C-alpha cells in the first residue's frame, strides 16, 4: 500500500481534460482539510498523553512523534496554499485556454501530486507511531 495517489492510472495528468484535473485538485483540497483536523486531534492526543508519561524513553518517543506531527501540520498548511494557487491557475486555464503553458501546468500538477502522496504517507506513519507509543504505555500501565 505504498501508492497514495487518488488519480486514475496511466497518463491521466498528461491527457486528462481540465475539468477532470480540477475535480482531482478539489479532492486534494478536501483531503488536506481532513488531514488538518486529523493532525489537530493527534497534537491534542499527544499533549494530553504527555502529562501521563512516566518512563524517560517513552517521553523521548512521544517528543519525537510530536515534532513529526508538527512538521506534518506545517506541511499541510503549505500544501493547502499550493493547492489553492493551483486551483486558481486551473480556473484561469479553463476560462482562457489559449494564454497558458499547458506543459508547465501539467508538470506542476504532477509535482503537487508527488508531494501530496509523500505527505499522506508521512501522516499515516506518524499517526501509527503515536498510537503505538500510547498503546505500549497503556499496556505497561495495566501490568
Image (spheres, rainbow, N blue to C red):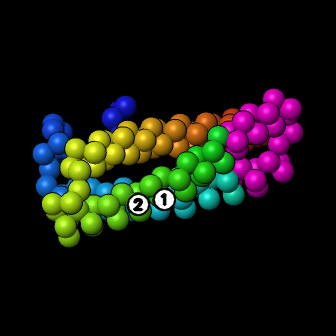
- Label 1 secondary element: helix
Compared to residue 37, the image places residue 5 above or below, namely above
| Other residues around mark 2 within 10 Å, as few (<14) / some (14–19) / many (≥20) | few
Q: Position of residue 117 (x, y in %)?
A: 40, 41
Q: Residues within 10 Å of mark 1 (few under 14, many from 20)?
A: few
Contact check, label 1 and label 2, Cβ < 8 Å? yes
- The one nearer the camera, 92 or 141, is 92
**Residue position for label 2:** 85
Would you say 138 lies left or right of 122 here?
right
Name the residue tied to disc 1. 81
Residue 106 is labelled as: none
Residue 23 seen: no
Q: At 63% from the left edge and 45% from the top edge, which residue is drawn?
A: 71
Question: Residue at the location (69% across, 57% down)?
Answer: 44
Task: Name the side, left or right, on which 51 lies relative to 40.
Answer: right
Q: Residue at x 41, y 60 (%)?
A: 85
Q: Secondary structure at mark 2?
A: helix
**Does 56 lie within the magenta span?**
yes
- Above or below, 1 relative to 17: above
The image position of residue 10, as x and y in percent, is 15, 37
Q: Position of residue 98 (x, y in %)?
A: 15, 60
Would you identify the image quadrant in which residue 32 lies?
bottom left
Give whichever of 56, 139 is nearer the camera: 56
> Looking at the rendering, which quadrant does residue 21 occupy?
bottom left
- 22 vs 127: above or below: below
Front residue (pair 114, 59): 114
Q: Which residues are magenta?
A: 45-67
- Magenta span: chief secondary structure: helix
x, y percent for residue 122: 52, 38
Q: Residue placed at 28% from the left, 45% from the top?
A: 104
Amino acid at each position: 500500500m505504498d501508492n497514495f495517489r487518488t488519480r486514475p492510472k496511466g497518463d491521466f495528468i498528461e491527457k486528462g481534460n481540465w475539468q477532470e484535473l480540477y475535480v482531482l485538485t478539489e479532492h486534494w483540497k478536501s483531503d488536506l482539510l481532513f488531514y488538518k483536523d486529523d493532525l489537530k486531534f493527534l497534537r491534542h492526543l499527544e499533549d494530553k498523553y504527555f502529562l501521563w508519561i512516566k518512563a524517560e524513553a517513552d517521553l523521548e518517543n512521544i517528543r519525537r512523534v510530536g515534532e513529526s506531527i508538527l512538521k506534518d501540520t506545517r506541511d499541510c498548511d503549505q500544501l493547502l496554499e499550493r493547492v489553492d494557487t493551483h486551483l486558481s491557475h486551473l480556473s484561469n486555464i479553463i476560462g482562457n485556454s489559449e494564454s497558458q503553458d499547458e506543459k508547465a501546468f501539467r508538470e506542476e500538477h504532477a509535482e503537487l501530486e508527488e508531494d501530496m502522496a509523500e505527505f499522506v504517507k508521512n501522516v499515516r506513519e506518524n499517526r501509527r507511531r503515536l498510537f503505538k507509543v500510547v498503546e505500549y504505555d497503556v499496556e505497561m500501565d495495566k501490568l
